[in-house]
Image (cartoon, grey):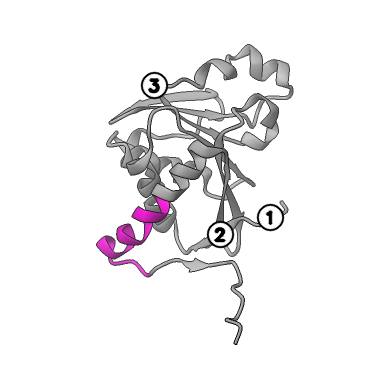
Amino acid sequence: MARPAGSRGLVLTSLRNTELMGKAIGQVLREGDVIALIGDLGAGKTALVHGIVSGLEAPPNSVASPTFMLMHQYQGRLPLIHMDLYRLRSSEEAEAIGLAEVFADDVVTAIEWADRFPGLLPSDRLEVRLFHRTFSTRSVQFVAQGARSRSLLSRIRRVWPSAHRRDGLPRPQRTEKRKAPSR
């Protein structure tokens, strides 16, 4: 999967690190936020949702990939609808299961394999793109698609470093290259 130009990325060094990133996201989510999870098989999409559920103060041990059920709902500080579009073959199938109806102002929505039907998603969404680096590390990039998702990304950036200090984990590495200061 190609990485989008101009997006920001981090390296997550373990499953725990991925779940902690998800927990930081869950802690700052607001009603109506939409998270579009994009990545190959095993890239960490469900692990990230596991953390999001924890950050929303719902029991994270109840999280399972909704590949066969297509949708799960978790109740925490906010209700979370967790969908998986992997098995769907057409936009007609996605419409038939009520994809458009899950995007409501009183819930948070996380959609795995969101890149399969981007035209059916809200235009304002936070895309979380996960890439394999090694067997245990992942690169994650955030692409904000609209004002609401830019605000969400800003909130995530504020809590992510403190989440790392609190749990005694090393700070994640940035994957973007920075220009040397001009003299």
- Measured from the top left, where is residue 132 in percent x and y? 61, 58
Residue 136 in sight: no
Name the residue that disc number 2 marks.
9
Foreground pick, 131 / 36: 36
> Mark 1 falls on what kind of element?
loop
Q: Which mark is residue 3?
A: 1
Magenta segment's dominant SS is helix
> Mark 2 falls on what kind of element?
strand
**As displayed, is residue 31 above or below residue 176?**
above
- Measured from the top left, where is residue 115 in percent x and y? 67, 37
Name the residue that disc number 3 marks.
106
Foreground pick, 78 / 75: 78
- Measured from the top left, where is residue 49 in percent x and y? 44, 40
Q: Evaluate if marks 1 and 2 touch, with contact meaning CB atoms under 8 Å apart.
A: yes
Per the rendered image, the range of residues in magenta is: 156-170
**As displayed, is residue 104 above or below residue 167?**
above
Ranked by sequence position, the earlier of labels 1 and 3 is: 1
Alpha carbons under labels 1 and 3: distance apart:
32 Å
Please tell me which residue is depicted at 44% across the width and 34% down the height of the picture.
64
Kind of residue indicated by mark 1: Arg
**As displayed, is residue 79 above or below residue 20?**
above
Give the quarter of the figure containing the C terminus. bottom right
Alpha carbons under labels 3 and 2: distance apart:
29 Å
Tell me which corner region of the image, top left, top right, bottom left or bottom right, holds residue 181: bottom right
Kind of residue indicated by mark 2: Gly
- Measured from the top left, where is residue 86 in percent x and y? 64, 32
Ranked by sequence position, the earlier of labels 1 and 2 is: 1
Please tell me which residue is depicted at 47% across the width and 47% down the height of the picture.
153
Residue sitting farthest toward the top: 96
